[in-house]
């Protein structure tokens, strides 16, 4: 037979399998019309593959009706199940939606209750942990201002008193070694350092309420009429006065200082514990207090131990955590004295000692 | 070559489009009509390919079931037949692999490209003139053909059936088998060589 190229054989193959395009079909038909080799190739191809036709002659090739019926039954059954499932899903979604819209009235579980409580507690704790310090800071500032206002009034009282008494501060002559801490005693012998200030109250220069610092705890405003006040030689108790005053032992030396000298301050921090531990006015002394590093650096308890307001003789008022003024003088101690029993006296006029 | 009414398939294109639209819409009558229309073609393909009545019926049902279930993803403008045979070919391959796992027979072995070309094989045939044969001989030849076909590697049997019996175009076969057109051609050539060699060696029709 005539020799065929590879392309010609492929065209004939495609034509045989009816896979050729229009152009290839025309080429194949031309080859078969004019090329003997092409005809032989085509006939051999047909001869080789035609036995495949026997494959269908073995039995009836038509699909049995029973198989069709089974198939349709299976398809429809599956479709019905699918429809039912879809309906079930739709029903379930409807139920879930209705359930989600219900108002829940059941009792919450213990753990849910616990978790919710813990969350609320944490929230409250967080709120107060922020609010309390802020509030405390604001209150402290307010109390400092109110305290300074009290001291300003007291300063005015001093000025008026000094004006009325030849420039002398209110002062009573006391015996040497007299206890300056016995607030509330009306005895002639026992004269506390608060008796000087009580003169301002008894003589009508000031009301008793200005002697209570709003920043101090465990205090009580004194509500007495003039008769009752006149009958008293001192504040009724320590809780009615929360300031410390310059200890003046000799009334003749109580002239208003010409230089700015501390006259009053928030309560002396060194002896605070003594008033808590010593409840008897019958004792002449309290248990000895020895100065420690802590006591030497302590500030008044009135303002959260942040410092103290100090009233100077010139009327100036200063809030500070400082205790040393003038010639290296600690306003809360007696110079060169380390142990205290409540009867100490300043060493000189420049040794300021604010008590009780 | 098995001659089927390919032209008839084209004649009813308009009707088929209308049928497909109804099928996609879920019309059961339309689907039943599709089953009726394609049942014999599909059944024949499966018989040629599977040679196991149980598998044939199982794959037949599975194919139509999937056709019905996948109607919403079917592109209505595409011809249905290649889509149906794509499903069927996949199902049939799966069924054969499942059977292979049970029987541990290498049914799914893939054929390597033959060293011989179609031309070589055809040229080796001494005589290609057909002679009449009686019924006994006919039955014997049918059995030999069946034996050769079902001994063919799966991929060669598949493409030979699709090309020779179902007369799909290269493009359609490429789509059905998810392989390039070039692979379709080379695989088909290999299938022809395989069958021809086996047939000639069994029948003593030539020296290859």
Image (cartoon, coloured by chain):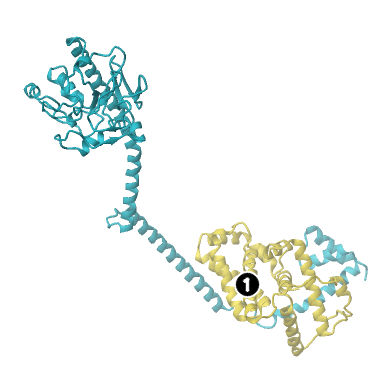
Residue B138 vertical placement versus B57 (above, below): below
- Identify the element where label 1 is drawn: helix
Extreme-left residue of the structure: A227
Q: Please provide percent x and percent y for residue A209.
A: 17, 25
Chain B shade in the render: yellow
Q: Quadrant of residue A205?
A: top left
Which quarter of the rendered picture does the N terminus of chain A lie within? bottom right
Residue A167 visible in the displayed image: yes
Circle 1 sits on which residue?
B94
Figure chain in cyan: A
Farthest residue to the right: give it.
Answer: A2
Q: Is residue A172 above or below residue A25?
A: above
Q: Give the residue at the far bottom of this rendering.
A: B136
Residue pictured at 80% horizontal, 80% vertical: B198
Find residue A242 and report its horizontal and vertical position in percent.
22, 28
Does residue A109 appear anywhere in the picture?
A: no
Task: Please name the residue shown 75% across and 61% down the image.
Answer: B181
């Amino acid at each position: 037979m005539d020799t065929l190229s590879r392309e010609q054989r492929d065209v004939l193959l495609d034509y045989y399998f009816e896979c050729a395009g229009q152009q290839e079909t025309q080429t194949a038909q031309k080859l078969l019309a004019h090329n003997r080799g092409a005809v032989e190739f085509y006939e051999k191809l047909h001869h080789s593959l035609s036995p495949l036709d026997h494959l269908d002659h073995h039995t009836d090739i038509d699909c049995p009706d029973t198989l069709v019926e089974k198939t349709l039954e299976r398809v429809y059954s599956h479709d019905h199940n699918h429809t039912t499932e879809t309906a079930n899903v739709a029903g379930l979604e409807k139920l879930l939606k209705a359930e989600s819209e219900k108002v829940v009235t059941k009792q919450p579980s213990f753990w849910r209750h616990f978790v919710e409580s813990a969350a609320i507690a944490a929230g409250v704790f967080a709120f107060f942990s922020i609010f309390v310090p802020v509030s405390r800071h604001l209150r402290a500032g307010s109390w400092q201002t109110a305290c300074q206002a009290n001291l300003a009034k007291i300063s005015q009282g001093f000025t008026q008193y000094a004006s009325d008494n030849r420039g002398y501060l209110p002062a009573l002559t006391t015996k040497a070694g007299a206890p300056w801490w016995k607030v509330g005693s009306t005895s002639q012998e026992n004269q506390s350092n608060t008796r000087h200030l009580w003169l301002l109250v008894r003589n009508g220069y000031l009301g008793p309420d200005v002697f209570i610092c709003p920043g101090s705890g465990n205090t009580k405003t004194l509500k007495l009429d003039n008769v009752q006040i006149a009958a008293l030689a001192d504040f009724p108790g320590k809780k009615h006065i929360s300031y410390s005053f310059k200890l003046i032992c000799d009334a003749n030396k109580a002239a208003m200082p010409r230089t700015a000298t501390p006259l009053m301050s928030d309560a002396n921090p060194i002896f605070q514990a003594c008033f808590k531990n010593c409840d008897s006015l019958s004792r002449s002394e309290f248990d000895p207090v020895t100065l420690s590093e802590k006591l030497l650096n302590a500030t008044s308890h009135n303002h959260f131990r942040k410092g103290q307001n100090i009233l100077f003789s010139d009327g100036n008022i200063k809030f500070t955590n400082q205790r040393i003024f003038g010639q290296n003088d600690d306003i809360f101690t007696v110079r060169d004295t380390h142990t205290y029993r409540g009867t100490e006296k300043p060493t000189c006029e420049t040794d300021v000692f604010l008590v009780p | 070559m098995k001659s089927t009414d390919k032209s008839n398939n084209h004649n009813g294109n308009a009707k088929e489009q209308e049928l497909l639209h109804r099928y996609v819409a879920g019309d059961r009558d339309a689907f039943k009509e599709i089953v009726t229309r394609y049942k014999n073609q599909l059944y024949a393909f499966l018989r040629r390919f599977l040679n196991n009545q149980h598998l044939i019926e199982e794959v037949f049902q599975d194919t139509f079931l999937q056709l019905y279930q996948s109607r919403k993803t079917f592109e209505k403008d595409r011809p249905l037949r290649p889509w149906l045979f794509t499903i069927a070919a996949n199902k049939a391959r799966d069924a054969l692999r499942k059977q292979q796992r049970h029987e541990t027979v290498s049914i799914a072995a893939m054929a390597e490209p033959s060293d011989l070309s179609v031309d070589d094989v055809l040229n080796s045939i001494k005589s290609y003139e057909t002679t009449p044969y009686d019924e006994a001989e006919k039955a014997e030849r049918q059995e030999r053909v069946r034996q050769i076909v079902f001994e063919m590697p799966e991929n060669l049997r598949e493409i030979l059936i699709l090309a020779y019996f179902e007369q799909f175009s290269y493009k359609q076969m490429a789509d059905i088998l998810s392989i390039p057109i070039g692979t379709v051609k080379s695989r088909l050539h290999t299938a022809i060589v395989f069958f021809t060699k086996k047939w000639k060696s069994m029948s003593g029709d030539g020296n290859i």
